[in-house]
Image (tube, rainbow, N blue to C red):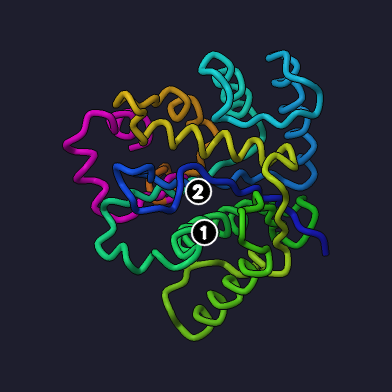
Amino acid sequence: MPQTFVVYVDESGDEGFSFGRGSSEWFVLSAVITRRVEDLQLVKLVDEVRVALGKPERKPLHFRDLRHEHRLPFVDKIANAPLRSISVCIRKPSILEPEKFHERFRLYFYGARYLLERVSWYCRDRKGPRDLGDGSAALVLSNRSGMSCQELRQYLRLLKTQSDAGHEVRVDWSAIKPERVTALRPGGRAGLQVADAVAGSFYYALERSRHGFTEDRYARMLKPVVYKHQGRYLGYGLKFWPEDWARAIGTEGRFGWLWDVYR
């Protein structure tokens, strides 16, 4: 049977640990989930934003390349679209054993596990009796330099093996199937452009600019589409790792938007 959902995954920030020499403090991995029958709505959304901003036809919208006044209508469209978003936000300086993540793509895979756990919970809980398909999701990733789609499929198969052996992997495998993963060039699908904007929105709310400022307006605007479970956003639509992120929030005013909007 065909899939019920389509999930687009993109990222913002980098996986490096050379702080003060170009590496970002935060690495954000975001998913945008839509029902397969509504997938074309994302094409319409991106086309409407492109026209409103006066961008050339078929030119992908890259969030980081847009000016602030152009990001706002893009985010506003997303916030009113038939989709849900999930973001995993990793504060790299808080990782106690960073040497474990120097291996190629290790941090990306670690974040992807948290992300796909939550994607699977959403798909499992949101498939209605009238929805077409088998309840699973087609995963469409933004193609990363040097990483093949096959490598992610192999990682997912490893997680499934660990899950079957009783390890603490909380992916619902009825929703996530390794063979249903594809990778396209960044911006290659409208949904990837939306996922890029979501990842960028939370990245800019967390990462200081070179002048020391953050911009949380986009993250605040996205609240209507952030996944929540039993009224909770944190741990579901927004997952922070490592877990000591709460201490940083308590001492740094730049994270006040989290308490104001998502607590």
Mark 1 element type? helix
**Residue at 61%, 49% in the rendered image:** 9
242 within the magenta span: yes
Residue 120, by quadrant, is: bottom right
- The percent position of residue 224, horizontal first and vertical second, equals 52, 31
Q: Looking at the image, which is closer to me, 197 or 209?
A: 209
Please give the range of residues in magenta.
236-263
Mark 2 element type? strand
Identity, as a three-letter code, of the amino acid under mark 1 = Ala
- The percent position of residue 189, horizontal first and vertical second, equals 75, 41
Q: Are marks 2 and 1 in contact (CB under 8 Å)?
A: yes
Image: 163 above or below 108: below
Identity, as a three-letter code, of the amino acid under mark 2 = Leu
Image: 20 above or below 123: above
Residue identifier under label 1: 112
- Image quadrant holding the N terminus, namely bottom right
Image: 113 above or below 157: above
Q: Residues within 10 Å of mark 2 (few under 14, many from 20)?
A: many
